[in-house]
Structure formats: structure tokens, C-alpha cells
């Protein structure tokens, strides 16, 4: 009779899944970079591509520390996220809207990875796999930083210029009356920062 699998087996499975996810991302990130109009966004994707290559090597060190062969197992989750990103890129959006959508796609991937590495770190710590836990924590920190970078680009101008292009006619047509009693500059500002807070909380 086969023995029931343990958390250690589940941990190795998750490592294989994540190893494959990182490999898929090294193919997807260049496409995101190429589609980006904003040079800072393009740079962010290219930088994260380099980091991702390092993360693959780091996972190989994790496997070695556990005396396991580095091996991947198809990650359906990231494949789905990448596929959605690919269909979004086929849409005919204006440049800055496309950039906002590329950020949205990138952040879906980063959050998926943050969930995976968060679990891996916790399991490694629980089982006393200290070296593995430290290596996985380094990658978790990089994923979080990559996510924050994308948020800062979105909230530092890309979302607003996409939004301005979407609603360019409104200020001209209906601004005058409201401007006097509602101080729209202040209210637009507070609306923007509350949207940013909502987005930050979601992350
Ligand atoms: Zn173990
Ligand atoms: Fe990664
Ligand atoms: Fe990542």
C-alpha cells in the first residue's frame, strides 16, 4: 500500500510548479516589455526578466539544498494568467491604455508568484528547511518589489493619462458650473488618492 504523501512531498510539488512558472515567465516578460510604450515600464519588465532568470537559478539552489533534482511540472495557473495577458495585447488600445493593461497583467503574475513563494517560505520554515526558506524569501522580496514598482508606475502617471484620454471631453463640456461650488481640482485629487489606496489595499 502506498503511503500518504506528506507536506514535504507537497512542498517539492509546489517547487516544481513554481520552477515551471518562472520558466514560462521568462518567455512572457519580453513580450510585455516589447508592447510597453512608456520606456520606464519597458525597463521595469526587462529588469524583472533578469531577476526572473536569477530566481530560476535560486530555485535550483533550493532543490540542491533538499537533495532533489531540479525539475518542473507544468503550472496551469501562470499559463492561464499569461494567456489572458496575451489576448489583452491583441486588443486595439491607445498606447497609455495598453500600458495600464500591461501593468494589470504583470501584477496578476506577480501576485500569483507572491502567493506561491509565501506558501513555500512558510512550509520550508515549518519543516526546518532553513537554507531553502532563506532563498525563497529572497525571491518573495523581489516579487513584492516588482509588484510595488508596477504600482508606482501605474499610480505615478500611466493610469491618469489613460483616464484623461478616456474622459478628455468631459472637462470641456460640463466643467464650468461644477467648478465653482465643488472645487473639482481638490476632489479629483482626493478621488485619485482614494483609488490608489484601494488598489494598495487589494495588493
Ligand atoms: Zn521537508
Ligand atoms: Fe518570479
Ligand atoms: Fe515575478
Image: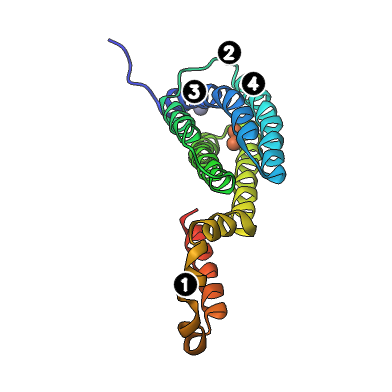
Circles 3, 4 touching at the beta carbon (< 8 Å): no
> In this view of the protein, which residue sits in the foreground, 173 or 8?
173
| Disc 4 element | helix
Q: Is residue 176 above or below residue 48?
A: below
| Disc 1 element | helix
Query: Hey, which quadrant is residue 4 in on the image?
Result: top left
Q: Earlier in the sequence, mark 3 or mark 2?
A: 3
Residue at mark 3 to residue at mark 1: CA–CA distance = 60 Å
Residue at mark 1 to residue at mark 2: CA–CA distance = 65 Å
Q: Earlier in the sequence, mark 3 or mark 1?
A: 3
The residue singled out by tag 2 in the image is 69
Q: Position of residue 123 (x, y in %)?
A: 49, 36
Circles 4, 2 touching at the beta carbon (< 8 Å): no
Q: Position of residue 27 (x, y in %)?
A: 59, 23
Residue at mark 3 to residue at mark 2: CA–CA distance = 10 Å
Q: How is the image coloured?
A: rainbow
Q: Position of residue 190 (x, y in %)?
A: 53, 75
Q: Which mark is residue 12?
A: 3
| Disc 2 element | loop
Mark 4 CB in 8 Å range of ligand 2?
Answer: no
Q: Is residue 55 above or below residue 101?
A: above
What residue lies at 68% left-to-right and 23% top-to-bottom? Answer: 57
> In this view of the protein, which residue sits in the foreground, 143 or 184?
184
Q: Which mark is residue 173?
A: 1
| Disc 3 element | helix
Q: Is residue 142 left or right of residue 104?
A: right
The residue singled out by tag 4 in the image is 60
Amino acid at each position: 500500500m502506498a503511503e500518504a504523501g506528506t507536506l514535504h512531498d507537497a512542498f517539492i510539488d509546489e517547487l516544481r510548479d513554481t520552477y515551471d512558472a518562472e520558466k514560462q515567465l521568462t518567455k512572457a516578460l519580453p513580450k510585455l516589455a516589447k508592447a510597453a510604450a512608456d520606456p520606464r515600464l519597458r525597463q521595469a519588465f526587462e529588469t524583472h526578466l533578469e531577476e526572473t532568470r536569477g530566481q530560476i537559478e535560486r530555485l535550483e539552489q533550493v532543490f540542491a539544498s533538499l537533495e532533489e533534482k531540479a525539475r518542473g511540472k507544468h503550472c496551469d495557473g501562470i499559463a492561464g494568467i499569461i494567456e489572458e495577458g496575451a489576448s489583452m495585447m491583441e486588443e486595439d488600445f491607445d498606447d497609455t491604455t495598453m500600458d495600464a493593461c500591461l501593468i494589470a497583467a504583470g501584477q496578476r503574475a506577480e501576485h500569483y508568484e507572491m502567493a506561491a513563494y509565501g506558501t513555500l517560505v512558510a512550509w520550508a520554515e515549518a519543516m526546518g528547511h532553513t537554507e531553502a526558506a532563506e532563498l525563497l524569501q529572497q525571491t518573495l522580496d523581489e516579487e513584492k518589489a516588482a509588484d510595488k514598482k508596477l504600482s508606482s508606475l501605474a499610480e505615478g502617471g500611466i493610469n491618469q493619462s489613460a483616464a484623461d484620454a478616456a474622459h478628455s471631453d468631459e472637462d470641456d463640456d460640463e466643467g464650468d458650473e461644477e467648478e465653482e461650488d465643488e472645487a473639482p481640482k481638490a476632489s479629483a485629487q482626493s478621488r485619485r488618492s482614494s483609488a490608489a489606496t484601494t488598489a494598495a489595499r487589494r495588493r
